[in-house]
Image (cartoon, rainbow, N blue to C red):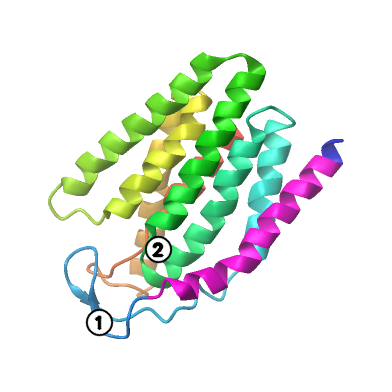
Amino acid sequence: MTGVLVTAAATLGALAGLAAPRIARAFLPPASPRPSRAGHAAPRPTGQPGHGVPPAVVGAVVCAGLAVARGPEPALPAFLLVAAVGVVLAVVDLASLRLPDPLVGAAALGGGTALTVAAVAAGSPGRLALALAGAALSFLLYVVLALLPRSRLGFGDVKLAAVLGLPLGWLGWPTLWLGLLLPHLLNGVLVLALLVAGRVRRDTALPFGPALLTGAWLAVLLA
């Protein structure tokens, strides 16, 4: 049973990864230069999400990892739905520095609906209330961070943080706090490495969505 569950989860993630590049191209901005999140002019993205690990492989690993860590619990479909859309969002953000509302909304709708079903099935409405509280707290904290002077966060990041607060909150406060902290640690290490390697400058606009999603994923695995 566990093997079937993990295989099904990996397949879902792989399909999301296969679809991600095509979806990313649909959200590319016009050819004219656009301002970066810091307010400076930035060149148009190439539309390629990168030449590293294929998104299908990333999606399979992400969703299979969730299936292994969480097992056949009622909330697993919610985690998988958010993760599958998250793989697409990460590729889109890497390609265009955008976290489009339709995709963030799809993650919110899918995750929220699945958690509601899980709460009813498990007879635990308190868990659903905790998930909603986690989403609200994540939203408020990231609004404050986005409004700080010289912040690199966009409001797409704020909305995604609120969506990720749902599954993180479902798992409890320690997991929520870890999921809110890890993205900044991961992003800080990545930015420092890129600066040292001369791949970016201090004013280069970089996507934060992948760090948000990776931090939340790791927090769920460690819960």
Residue 65 image offset from top left, x and y in percent:
68, 44
Residue 179 image offset from top left, x and y in percent:
45, 37
Q: Does residue 160 appear to the left or right of 201 in the view shown?
A: right
Pick whichever of labels 1 and 2 is earlier in the sequence. Answer: 1
Q: Amino acid at mark 2?
A: Ala
Q: Does residue 183 appear to the left or right of 55 in the view shown?
A: left
Q: Does residue 87 appear to the left or right of 143 in the view shown?
A: right
The label nearer to you, 1 versus 2, is 1
Tell me, yes or no, whether the highlighted magenta stretch contains residue 9: yes
Q: Disc 1 marks which residue?
A: 33
Residue drawn 51% across and 74% down? 50
- In the rendered image, the residue lying farthest to the left is 149
Highlighted magenta segment, given as a residue range = 4-28
Residue drawn 41% across and 46% down? 183
Residue 156 image offset from top left, x and y in percent:
33, 54
Residue 120 image offset from top left, x and y in percent:
61, 20
Residue 141 appearing in the image: yes
Tell me, yes or no, whether the highlighted magenta stretch contains residue 216: no
Q: Disc 2 marks which residue?
A: 193
Say which element carries label 2.
helix
Residue drawn 39% across and 37% down? 180
176, above or below 85, in the image: above
Quadrant location, the C terminus: top right
Residue 223 appearing in the image: no
